[in-house]
């Protein structure tokens, strides 16, 4: 789609939902100063008289009018930063929960013109909360300098880029040149500036620096490295890391100690910074432009992918029509009463699970009312892109994934397979599909969910004397290497991300084998403690006596329910197979009757032609 069409979707997802704006600027008029007594000598009155907005009131008026004339008109509030001192920024940040857009002046201290310490602290606190915030940083200072200072203030240090031995060796080598050039360290430091450091961080600490649009040159560094005898790539890389560590030590007092998740920023002409909790646009006060237009242009420079627009639209739709949708979703009082009755009558041990189940059902009801509008938005956007026909180019532009390369296709398929069949472990007790590591092996729980709820079996005839123990069936998973599309779509494998690595597993060790399963007994009814649980397995001891041997298990993953059910079906087919007395050539030699020639019965083999979920078919 062209830029104008994309801009329309962008405005619909991010700008149209705005309802209020808070301006924090030390040169704007406020209600508090308007209500001062005549000739007041208070500190607020003195601060008011120092403001310069009266010299050019049209500029302030035009900005406020631009917000009030938008569609829909925005509620405008003003805070002039008066009395904001160290530690007081949090009060302003809390106030932001009542507004959707923040227009922030960079320099909030007239005594220290150009100092953005207060503004940086406010942005830090904003990005630390759970509400997604849009910020326009409006400044009369040099825009490039303001952007760089704000970025440094939001970054956390890399930490050690070299080992102590590497650092000492580097210092010793440079020391050999100090007699001839006493200030050699200062000269080396000058070859890699703060701009170089930010470019280094932008590309994930990679070296050498790639040439983005405005990356500073490294010719001076290369020449200095050559004079030290560092002409090979590994040596120059270590020298760069050494100098970047020194540069970071100087910048550390301006940086955060704890990293902001998924912080990213621009390298083009229009600066922006974003994180999971907010987006910051930068604009100059000298430009008497519409700040909403400036925000949109900055969002265009970021160019969020369609998936993010879909979710932003969903969030906006919940804010806009959530109350109406909520009333519609809660219309069936009989159903709601039945659910709540179950919660009230549940004992403490099972209530937590039942609450999670009930909240999930309520969420489904709400989303059923919200999703049609979001789906319509997504459909219109996809149609606009599909009309261009350049699928590979669009995916590369939006997601930086080049489907013209086989490696990108393989990686995307693998990530898809992991996503559709597994998820981050959830819950507070053992559940169907939980994958755990114990006894030097990986296992999956394949007991039906209804038999795993703590507390519900305590009074039953079967479980009444188990003393807090939860019986369950676990099957050992076997690590496999899946190489073909036919293997993947055979419905025999699952994909999990364990310790950051993607791993494929099968229920059977090899073709023709049967699943390796055990009846296990979880302590404390399978409740988790620190991400794990204890269980016992009945085994023969050294004297040939059956004993319940204890084990400790760590939860490492969880299958989505339909994939867990698929494996349960396969296990059930194996456990109900009928042994027949036919003999094959190999079996006859040993005199062993054949069992099932194929561990997958004919009915199940037919079922394996389809994935558990047609929409989520593995690729």
Image: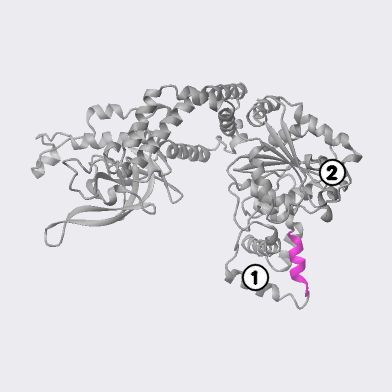
Name the quadrant containing residue 13. top right
Question: Is residue 355 rendered to the left or right of residue 548?
Answer: right
Q: Where, quadrant-wise, is the N terminus in this rendering?
A: top right
Q: Disc 1 on helix, strand or loop?
A: helix
The crowd level at tag 2 (other Cα within 10 Å; few <14, some 14-19, many 20+) is few
- The residues tagged by marks 1 and 2 sit, at their Cα atoms, a distance apart of 67 Å
Asked if residue 69 can be seen in this view, the reply is yes
Is residue 185 shown in magenta?
yes
Asked if residue 209 can be seen in this view, the reply is no
Q: Disc 2 on helix, strand or loop?
A: loop
The answer to whether residue 356 is above or below residue 387 is below
What residue range appears in magenta?
181-192
Q: Which residue is mark 1?
A: 170
Task: Provide residue 399's location: percent of width, then percent of height.
Answer: 59, 37
Task: Provide residue 417's location: percent of width, then percent of height.
Answer: 43, 37
Name the quadrant containing residue 17. top right
**In this view, the mark in front (1 or 2):** 2
Give the overall secondary structure of the magenta segment.
helix
Q: Which residue is mark 2?
A: 37
Q: Residue at the spot x=58%, y=23% of the render? A: 377
State the mark number for residue 466: none
């Amino acid at each position: 789609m062209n830029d104008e069409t994309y801009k329309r979707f962008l405005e619909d997802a991010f700008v149209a939902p705005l309802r209020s704006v808070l301006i924090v600027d030390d040169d704007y008029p406020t209600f508090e100063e308007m209500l001062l007594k005549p000739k007041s000598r208070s500190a607020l009155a003195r601060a008011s008289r120092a403001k310069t907005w009266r010299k050019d009131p049209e500029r302030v008026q035009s900005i406020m009018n631009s917000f009030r004339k938008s569609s829909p008109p925005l509620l405008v509030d003003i805070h002039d930063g008066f009395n904001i001192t160290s530690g007081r920024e949090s009060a302003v940040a809390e106030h932001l929960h009542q507004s959707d857009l923040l227009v922030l002046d960079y320099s909030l201290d007239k005594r220290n013109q150009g100092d953005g310490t207060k503004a940086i602290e406010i942005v830090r606190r904003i990005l630390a909360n759970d509400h997604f915030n849009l910020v326009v940083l409006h400044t009369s200072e040099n825009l490039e300098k303001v952007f760089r200072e704000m970025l440094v203030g939001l970054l956390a240090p890399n930490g050690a880029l070299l080992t102590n031995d590497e650092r000492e060796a580097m210092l010793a080598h440079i020391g050999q040149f100090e007699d001839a050039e006493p200030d050699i360290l200062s000269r080396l430091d000058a070859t890699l500036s703060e701009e170089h450091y930010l470019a280094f961080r932008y590309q994930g600490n990679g070296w050498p620096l790639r040439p983005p649009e405005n990356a500073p040159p490294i010719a001076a560094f290369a020449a200095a490295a050559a004079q030290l005898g560092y002409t090979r790539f590994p040596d120059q890389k270590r020298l760069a890391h050494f100098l970047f560590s020194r540069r970071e030590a100087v910048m550390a007092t301006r940086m955060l100690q704890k990293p902001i998740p998924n912080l990213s920023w621009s390298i083009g002409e229009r600066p922006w910074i974003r994180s999971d909790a907010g987006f910051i646009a930068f604009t100059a006060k000298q430009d008497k432009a519409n700040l909403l237009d400036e925000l949109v242009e900055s969002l265009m420079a970021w160019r969020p992918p369609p998936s993010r627009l879909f979710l932003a639209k969903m969030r906006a739709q919940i804010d806009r029509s959530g109350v109406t949708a909520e009333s519609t979703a809660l219309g069936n009082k009989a159903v709601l009463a039945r659910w709540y009755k179950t919660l009230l009558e549940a004992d403490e041990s099972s209530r937590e699970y039942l609450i999670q189940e009930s909240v999930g059902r309520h969420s489904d009801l709400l989303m059923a009312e919200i999703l049609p509008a979001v789906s319509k938005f997504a459909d219109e956007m996809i149609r606009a892109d599909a009309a261009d026909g350049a699928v590979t180019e669009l995916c590369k532009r939006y997601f930086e994934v080049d489907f013209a390369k086989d490696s990108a296709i393989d990686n995307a398929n693998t990530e898809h397979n992991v996503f559709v069949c597994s998820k981050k472990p959830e819950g507070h007790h053992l559940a169907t599909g939980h994958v755990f590591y114990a006894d030097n092996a990986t296992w999956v729980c394949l007991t039906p969910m209804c038999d795993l709820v703590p507390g519900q079996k305590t009074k039953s005839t079967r479980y009444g004397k188990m003393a807090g123990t939860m019986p369950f069936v676990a099957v050992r998973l076997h690590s496999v290497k899946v190489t073909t599309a036919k293997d993947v779509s055979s419905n025999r494998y699952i994909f999990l991300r364990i310790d950051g690595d993607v791993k494929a597993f099968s229920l059977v060790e090899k073709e023709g084998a049967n699943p390796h399963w055990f009846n296990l007994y979880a302590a404390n009814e399978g409740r988790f403690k620190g991400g794990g649980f204890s269980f016992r397995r009945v085994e023969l001891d050294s004297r040939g006596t059956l004993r319940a041997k204890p084990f400790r298990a760590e939860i490492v993953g969880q299958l989505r329910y339909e994939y867990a059910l698929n494996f349960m079906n396969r296990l059930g087919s194996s456990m109900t197979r009928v042994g027949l007395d036919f003999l094959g050539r190999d079996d006859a030699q040993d005199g062993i009757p054949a069992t099932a020639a194929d561990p997958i019965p004919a009915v199940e083999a037919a079922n394996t032609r389809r994935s558990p979920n047609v929409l989520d078919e593995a690729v």
